[in-house]
Image (cartoon, rainbow, N blue to C red):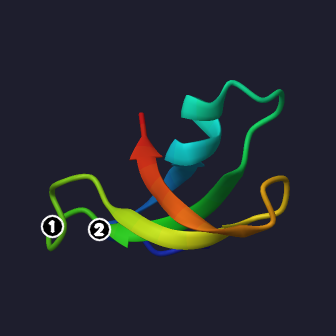
């Protein structure tokens, strides 16, 4: 049985890819502690379609 805690799953989506209008999306799934990090997170992750590291923001 899994423990109930403060960690939640969030989806990160590439901001550059979304703005470029190219088909497809670059998304990652990660977890965050909702008590310590109440605001949306931004991480630099690799976008395989654009073939470079870009900023990925949390979506709801």
Answer above or below: position of 42 versus 2. Answer: above
* Circle nearer the N terminus (1, 2): 2
Disc tally is: 2
* 23 displayed left or right of 32: right
Residue 42 location (% of width, % of height)? 36, 62
**Splitting the image into 4 quarters, where does residue 23 fall?**
top right
Determine the secondary structure under disc 2: loop
Answer above or below: position of 44 versus 24. Answer: below
Q: Which quadrant is home to the N terminus?
A: bottom right
In this view, the residue farthest toward the front is: 20
Residue 19 location (% of width, % of height)? 55, 31
Residue nearest the viewer, comparing 19 with 39: 19
Q: Mark 2 points at which residue?
A: 6
- Work out whether residue 14 can be spotted: no
Q: Residue at x 46, y 75 (%)?
A: 3
How would you rate the neighbour count of disc 2 (Cα within 10 Å): few for under 14, some for 14-19, many for 20 or more? Answer: few
Q: Do the residues labelled 1 and 2 touch (CB within 8 Å)?
A: yes
Q: Which quadrant is home to the C terminus?
A: top left
Q: Which residue is drawn at 71% across and 69% down?
A: 52
- Work out whether residue 2 can be spotted: yes
Answer above or below: position of 4 versus 58. Answer: below
Q: Residue at x 78, y 55 (%)?
A: 50
Tag of residue 35 = 1
């Amino acid at each position: 049985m899994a423990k109930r805690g403060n960690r939640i799953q969030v989806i990160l989506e590439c901001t550059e890819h979304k703005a470029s209008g190219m088909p497809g999306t670059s998304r990652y799934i990660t977890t965050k502690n909702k008590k310590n990090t109440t605001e949306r997170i931004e991480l630099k992750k690799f976008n395989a379609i654009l073939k470079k590291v870009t900023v990925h923001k949390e979506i709801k």
